[in-house]
Image: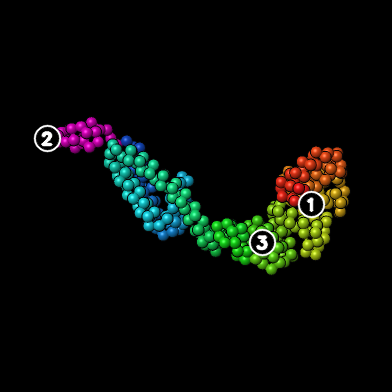
Amino acid sequence: MNKVCPRCGREYAQMSPACPYCPDRPTWYAVLAVAVALLSVMLAASAILPAGQIVVGDEVRGGFIKFDNAIIARTGPFGRFVHLVFAGGGFACAYALWKWKPWSPRAVAGLFVVWVVWSVTVRVRGGEAASLQNAPARLQEACQDGDAMACATLGEMYDFGDGVPPDDARAAVFYEKGCDGGVLLSCQNLGAMYFFGEGVTRNLTRAASLYERACDDGIALGCYALGAMYANSEGGTLDLARAASLLEMACNGGQAPGCTTLGVLHMSGDEVSQDPSRAATLFERACDGGDAPGCHNLALMYDRGMGIQQDSARADSLLGKACELGLTEAC
């Protein structure tokens, strides 16, 4: 009595140890079997391990797992059950591939399509929400372990209410830790909180110190904020020469309001050369950078022909832009 080969369906002698018609198992079958098995292990882990225990690369994913930008979120018992079903199907496919079953590649392809549809559906329904919900706890743990960037990120989250309820006091605490750890943008943000008295007692001296630290390390916004303080004698010190130097750095660093304020100084000639042409250039840079007062000031110069050729049409256009940018005086 002959045997029937389960792979090719042909009969061969019962005494033969293997089907003589079938070649050896292709190498890619074995490679695919190992890959599917590893994926199945990850899916099983995402359903069994507690949140925060899954590590993909160097990134901790609390409660969800990521493959090629497709997120499968753990949304509850049903989600865990589906993960286990996928894992079981994956192990079955891996076994079939290893044993070289002719239908196994088609089964793997079908499982992959179902997995992608499920992962996209879960992501739309709540994968991102789960990520945001777990983010503060993970960041706080990292901050406590000395990660200054995590502290800075938490400060911004509490400052702007990004994924958490706004809390100025907590934002100030995390900004302080981020600044102490060398994140200079945190120094700038903390300086603003001290300047406006948000979450902390107002302290202009402390604000100026933090702005200066940020500016010294290349944060243009810090240069602008400190320059504006010197220009407006906020904190008890009026120093227009120092203000002009700081505003120049801010303007060159992309801070459009710094260009506007520096332009005003050049119009008045306070501690800098009185130069309407230079002022017009600065106002134009500010306007191009989206600063409404810069557009407004340049419009006045064109309207009155101050340092530049008078051009009423250009003035009206600039006033319209200033209005669009939110300056009601230009409307």
CA separation in Å, label 2 and label 3: 87 Å
**Residue count near mark 2 (Cα–Cα under 10 Å), binned few <14, some 14–19, many ≥20:** few
In the rendered image, residue 172, in percent from the top left (x then y), is placed at: 63, 64
* Residue situated furthest front in the rendering: 331
Q: Residue furthest bottom?
A: 201
Amino acid of disc 1: Thr
Locate residue 114, reporting x and y percent: 38, 44
Indicate how the structure is coloured in the image.
rainbow
Residue 25 quadrant: top left
The residue range painted magenta reads: 1-25
**Disc number placed over residue 190 in the picture, else none:** 3
Q: Which residue is mark 1?
A: 261
User: Is residue 216 among what the camera can see?
Assistant: no
170 or 290: nearer the viewer: 290
- Relative to residue 121, is residue 3 drawn left or right? left
The label on residue 327 is none
Q: Where does label 2 land, which residue?
A: 1
Q: Residue at horizontal 86%, vertical 43%?
A: 304
Q: Residue at x 80, y 65 (%)?
A: 236
Earlier along the polypeptide chain: callout 2 or callout 3?
Answer: 2
- Where is residue 96 shown, x and y percent of the image? 29, 42
